Amino acid sequence: MTDNAPIGGGILAAAGFRSAAVKCGIKADALDLALLVSDAPASVAAVLTTSKAVAAPVIVCRDHLAQSGGIGRAIVVNSGCANACTGQTGMAAAREMATVTARSVGCSLEQVLIASTGVIGLHLDVDKVARGLERAVGMLGRDASRAAAEAIMTTDLSPKEAALRVRSSAGVFAIGGMVKGAGMIEPMMATMLGFLTTDAAIAPALLQRALAEVTDDTFNAITVDGECSTNDSVFLMASGTSGVTIDDDLYPHFVAGLREVCGTLARNIVRGGEGATKLVSVNVSGGRTQDEAKRAAHAIANSPLVKTALHGGDPNWGRLVAVAGRAGVDFDLSHSRVQIGTTVLFENDTMHADREPQAAEHLKGKEVSVGVDLGVGGPGEATVWTCDLSSEYVHINADYRS
Amino acid sequence: MTDNAPIGGGILAAAGFRSAAVKCGIKADALDLALLVSDAPASVAAVLTTSKAVAAPVIVCRDHLAQSGGIGRAIVVNSGCANACTGQTGMAAAREMATVTARSVGCSLEQVLIASTGVIGLHLDVDKVARGLERAVGMLGRDASRAAAEAIMTTDLSPKEAALRVRSSAGVFAIGGMVKGAGMIEPMMATMLGFLTTDAAIAPALLQRALAEVTDDTFNAITVDGECSTNDSVFLMASGTSGVTIDDDLYPHFVAGLREVCGTLARNIVRGGEGATKLVSVNVSGGRTQDEAKRAAHAIANSPLVKTALHGGDPNWGRLVAVAGRAGVDFDLSHSRVQIGTTVLFENDTMHADREPQAAEHLKGKEVSVGVDLGVGGPGEATVWTCDLSSEYVHINADYRS
């Protein structure tokens, strides 16, 4: 783990992949279609939304993953239209999007995965996608990672990429990725759109295990607004081009690297949250169980009163207590502790109002932390990353479609 | 029920009660202490917060209600300080507040109920309360209902009162009340501050049953921001002065009147929600059970994406579907239906984009409705009232203490 080094290149940091991004015309004048292709059949893993209002592309991916046994060649993503709640027309469009990709790339249909993001309840113009795909296939190269990260954006303010060089006893390999996500972010049940690659060789089942494990404490431990979307998906492709094979011995090493990349991308989603001005780490301890600590941390991280206080730089610790008390988990007020940054403001039933200026100073930063000990004396601990709630969030979402 | 008529007078519409409100000095220059006294011992009922971070006055009320067997004489309420998370000092202050009231009014300690609302984690200046109480007792009268409703306000924009004249086979009686609540409102587990009176005669046990029953589909069916407070309480006192005794036969009649008063007050809380510009009725049908319909309705009513879209007047029905899908209840997208006002925008897997202008027109109103059928074909139905989410909410709560 200690030898890992952040590198550039995003989804193309790993060898064996090519990418392209084009303006296919779903958006007025912006990159809106990204194509990622593995030179040879690759292991693929995916974590898909568990929302019951599931979008057409997610249904197609479930089918293809089941049919391919975890082997894939291409992922195509459009932004501007989520192809969700679009009925049979939407399903036909999603299947057509995959079919055109398979034909253009020259692989079997089940080796194609697709994703869409944008407005719900808008029909996907599959002709635009098809024409865009034809151009994209001709442009595939090793330098389009940033363009691809741009093409998957919706209200994101900037593209989000990360990559890591991992040195292992069996050799060097890379893990990289890109994500989009700004609103409708709380992947408690699954996750937002993320695309990851590695040039390590790893069997599909082990790859899936690693992705599920890492997603749980990275993408599933962030929230912007408590929402979970119809299209949430994370994909991971392993080309094997590095020649390093991940066996049981190397697995922890691989997972550690993957966790580092996913953690960086997850925190970048929160930093880029709609209207966000601060990245907030919510740390809960002393819970009866880890699950209870997680539930309390998510409740605090989603509380409008906590998020607005953080926006205003107000060390209003009473709101943290109030949320912990209503979170539906074991909570003992007289043994609880509340801190902002490293400043303890409430402990042993005693408030420390004199320390509030110190806490207010901490809250002026761009990266802040709040901590609540539930006072139950249990082993439960959890961290959730969130952002503050600003007027800008309201402006963005009141005017999203107009 | 049909003979019921709205009347003025709030908590003093019912005979047998007197009230007063004073500036006791917790707030800079505003009414901040209200006293409500029954001329004779009255039946009392209460629904108190189920938050585990419970404020001192709530603990005192629990004790007194247990000791008095549901008989009370006086309720005293201060605003500006919640006396929550104030430890043993806060408990002593709350008990002192009740003791001073009992002495001033001339009743036993357990016949006094107390409530506090305002900033959490601030010590209550009980000397100010005591001096205020002495003045208030001297001012008790039959015309101070509106002043009392003002004295319990925090960020509320206006006092909230309602009252009803109920004609029954046994004679005429009145039910009235006042509430406060603007932020930290989602009494799923208990309720906000509310004070109700009636001059009907009703035994404490039956009064408690009526209050619990009515609270469930009035005060517990509203939300402003999904928060539940440390101090949430609703009290109901019955003086019996009208001479009408509520027996089992008249009970449904009494409950209907109480529901009317509490429903009006509850909707007024939402109308006066922090930053609210619209009252929104969220109607969910077709749920597997009533509980599932309620959970879906609360999820929709608390969704920042739904609330911002409503604020912007955007008939973005896709967000309603997305929330229903992630609400953790049975949901069948292809049999679901979404409507805004009376306009159906999504049904049988088919969207009706052409009808959006009609839905947008409905959303221009001050009182709007959205409906989601979960498509499961079950009997579950629920209505929750909420408001839109505006920049003003952020401003109010980012700057609450500064």
Image (spheres, coloured by chain):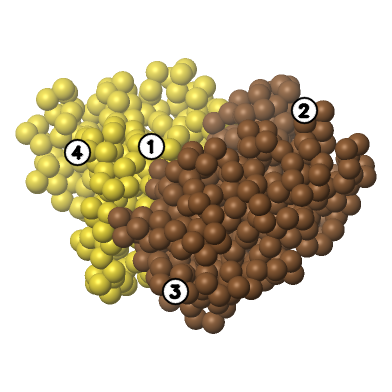
Chain colours: A brown, B yellow
At x 19%, y 38%, the residue is: B256
Foreground of the two, A129 or B277: A129
Three-letter amino acid code of the residue under disc 1: Val
Q: Position of residue A255 (x, y in %)?
A: 76, 38
Label of residue A128 in the image? 3
Three-letter amino acid code of the residue under disc 2: Asp
Residue B2 located left or right of residue A285? left
Q: Quadrant of residue B362?
A: bottom left
- Which residue is the site of mark 1? B329
Label 1, label 4: how far apart the Cα atoms are: 31 Å
Crowding at mark 2 (Cα within 10 Å: few <14, some 14-19, many 20+): few
Q: Nearer the viewer, mark 2 or mark 4?
A: 2
Label of residue A155 in the image? none
**Can I make out residue A307 in this image?**
no
Label of residue B256 in the image? 4
**Residue farthest to the front?**
A106
Foreground of the two, A83 or B58: A83
- Which residue is the site of mark 2? A248
**Can I make out residue A89 in this image?**
yes
Asked if the residue at tag 2 contacts the one at tag 3, i.e. Cβ–Cβ closer than 8 Å, the answer is: no
